[in-house]
Image: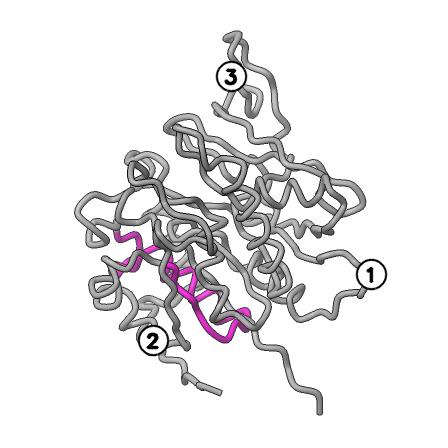
Amino acid sequence: MADVKKTALVIMAAGIGSRYKNGIKQLAPVGPEGELIMDYSIRDAIDAGFDKVVFIIRRDLEEEFKRVIGSRVEQQIKVEYAFQELEDLPEGFVCPPERTKPWGTGQAVLAAKKILSEPFAVINADDYYGKEAYRLVHAFLLQDQPADGFLHICMAGFRLGNTLSDNGTVTRGICRIQEGCLTGIRETKNISRTADGAGEKRSDGQIYPLDLNSLVSMNMWGLTPDFLDSLEAGFIDFLNEHAGESEPKEFLLPIFIDRLIRENKVRVEVLETKDSWFGVTYKEDLPAVISSFKKLTEAGVYPRGLYRQQVTVCDD
């Protein structure tokens, strides 16, 4: 019998310490028993069939992260850690002494290159994506892709109307899609709900209507080890281009993938999910997120107490 492919979930959590002052203890609990958003993400990944979790964190938060989060997740699924560091650059490059801002999500994923030999999904630590997205991405990662000279990856596409905040504007990557594949992403700022649905406020002060059913990227990707080789080459190109600039720029995963699309090097299958995205963009969002997880628990989507039901971990 053929071996079943192993799959990994990569959680980008290196930015936690900068977004939540005083470290990861300030991550807001959202579940009935104090669960964090990423606890639900990991549960959904386990249910979908993922075999391990890779946390990308800051090295200075390692001890606290493992104590607060990692120790309980390790009882559920195999866990590995990678570290995003300013000084972790390709040979020949040195971090400018004045730079304090991380290099972006592209470098974050590259930090896990040495420990990823299987196809993997990438998510943000503080976003809730829903169960369907994990099932769709996992099924894609198990498929054998054609050897046609293209990189084959996927992206979970969410309906714009399921990703808005009632408490302020948001930025979303609105997707252009042809025959089920991504042809481009337009980063769109200042999106808010309107009487007719949703709209984008532009520099002229006018609000331009947007289709609530438009698919947007929420930074959930299905990637492969081969993609990491291209990502590494892209990071070198990025550093060569921006090394002398005073304003620190970030090497962002969606922008790099958009570049590969324009260069006709990649095929990105868009997997539409009708689940709602949750996140705490504004502090005023928190009560609604807590209420949503309470309803999901009461409906039986999740057990009360995610960690009461242990999963046997296999290290093979």
Residue that mark 3 sits on: 201
Q: Which residues are magenta?
A: 29-56
Residue 105 included in the magenta stretch of the image? no
Q: What's under tag 1, amino acid-wise?
A: Asp
Q: What's under tag 2, amino acid-wise?
A: Glu
| Labelled pair 2, 3 in contact (Cβ < 8 Å) | no
Residue 36 included in the magenta stretch of the image? yes
Q: Earlier in the sequence, mark 2 or mark 1?
A: 2
Kindly identify the residue that appears in the image at 33 percent across and 78 percent down.
Answer: 75
Is disc 2 placed on a helix, strand or loop? Answer: loop
Residue that mark 2 sits on: 74
Residue farthest along the left direction in this orientation: 22
Q: Residues within 10 Å of mark 1 (few under 14, many from 20)?
A: few
| Labelled pair 2, 1 in contact (Cβ < 8 Å) | no
Q: Earlier in the sequence, mark 2 or mark 3?
A: 2
Position of the N terminus by quadrant:
bottom right
254 or 250, nearer to the observer: 250
Q: Position of residue 277 (x, y in %)?
A: 48, 46
Is disc 1 placed on a helix, strand or loop? Answer: loop
- Of tags 3 and 1, the one toward the viewer is 1
Q: Residues within 10 Å of mark 3 (few under 14, many from 20)?
A: some
* Mark 3 vs mark 1, CA separation in Å: 42 Å
Answer with the quarter of the image where residue 280 lies. Answer: top left
Q: Position of residue 289 (x, y in %)?
A: 36, 45
Kindly identify the residue that appears in the image at 50 percent across and 39 percent down.
Answer: 163
Kindly identify the residue that appears in the image at 40 percent across and 33 percent down.
Answer: 248
* Mark 2 vs mark 3, CA separation in Å: 44 Å
Q: What's under tag 3, amino acid-wise?
A: Lys
Residue that mark 1 sits on: 148
User: In the displayed structure, does residue 62 sit left or right of residue 160?
Assistant: left
